Image (tube, grey):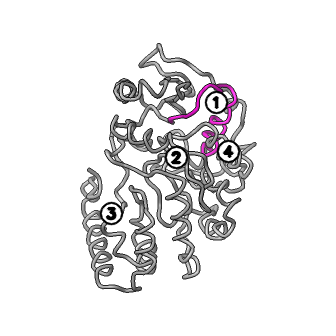
Amino acid sequence: MKKKTIAFVFFGQNRVEDFVINQLDEIRKAEEKFSMKLDFHILDATRDGIETKKNLHRVNLLKVNKINPNRDLDPLASYRNSGINSKITGGMSKATTYYPVIDYLEFINSEQNFDFIFRLRTDVLVNVKIIVQAIDNVIPLIKSSPYSLLKHKVWAQFFHLFVPFYIHDTAFLISSEDLYLISKEALSNLDFYPSYANPSCFWGPLFYKRFPYLLNLACKFISEIQEKPSLTYNDIKLLPIYWKIIFTNFHISFSPKVKFIGQWNLNKVETRLWKNISRKDCVKLSLQQLRFIFENFDNLYFEHNIESWMIYKISTNSKYNFQGNMIVIKILFKTLINKIFKLFGKSFFND
């Protein structure tokens, strides 16, 4: 039986290359475990090429360089001011939200020998344990169900419980076939892109086509102005369906945590889960209590698989149960403490 092939591909811009050597070491450790099942390949498809390790197989992606994003993709981009807290080389005034989709499609069309693609960046470090875990969960075929849309699950770091298909995408593992389907649908729905980077615009369109009732909920988060929408009870009743789709098509895991150098501060390593909610807290909350958290604190980034029993438990919890109310109060205190910490340039939620 022919071994499957997996490509570990560095995409995007080289703001920093601090993690490249360590990332290669982590990949080689994983390769030892899967040497009998998978052929590993490591490629550099970054915008300018990786200098840290010059013997990487280089793939030149050219289509992005031929596009004027301000004119062709986002005519309002050049009129915006990204602000001092925005990305250094991207964000609202650069229209870079579109670039990854174009890169993925060009890569898949030019490199057709890979069954799976592990998307990496030079400013992200994925531990060998999570690489192994991701491969174990993505290689098998998905069992057919009313909610299955992809052939294989996708490993991603975490997702937002309320924003449809806000699935963190600095690093992920996906089959080439599924990446093509998702990218093609995303590129054909450019009107879904807001003026700020939002992963739901990449992952969502393919699923909205199959599950159109989620489209109405998703549209509440699409705006030229970055603001939090007001959600009705009918809106939040759709969330358990959204979670079933996530559970079926994605493997969510952020353990061990993925290290990341933020584009807004190239000297600081983060894990980006300062607004996460734990599994043990989540299952004690009702949909109404979760909505209150979303409207007031937004601590709803979930770093685990949301399994069927959890979805049922949350859906059937009483509206204002005592345990859930205590968790809301705990989040309130964490938020207040974090604001105090920020006065001294630190964050209570960061490691």
- How many other residues sit within 10 Å of disc 4, few (<14), some (14-19) or many (≥20)? few
Amino acid identity at mark 2: Val
Q: Position of residue 16 (x, y in %)?
A: 42, 30
- How many other residues sit within 10 Å of disc 1, few (<14), some (14-19) or many (≥20)? many
Q: Earlier in the sequence, mark 2 or mark 4?
A: 2
Q: Earlier in the sequence, mark 2 or mark 1?
A: 1
Q: Quadrant of residue 17?
A: top left
What's the distance in space between the residues labelled 2 and 4, CA to CA?
13 Å
Q: Which mark is residue 107?
A: 1
Residue indicated by mark 4: 181
Residue indicated by mark 3: 278
Q: Does residue 265 appear to the left or right of 232 in the view shown?
A: left
Q: Which residues are magenta?
A: 95-118
191 relative to 117, above or below:
below
Is 148 covered by the magenta stretch?
no
223 relative to 229, above or below:
above
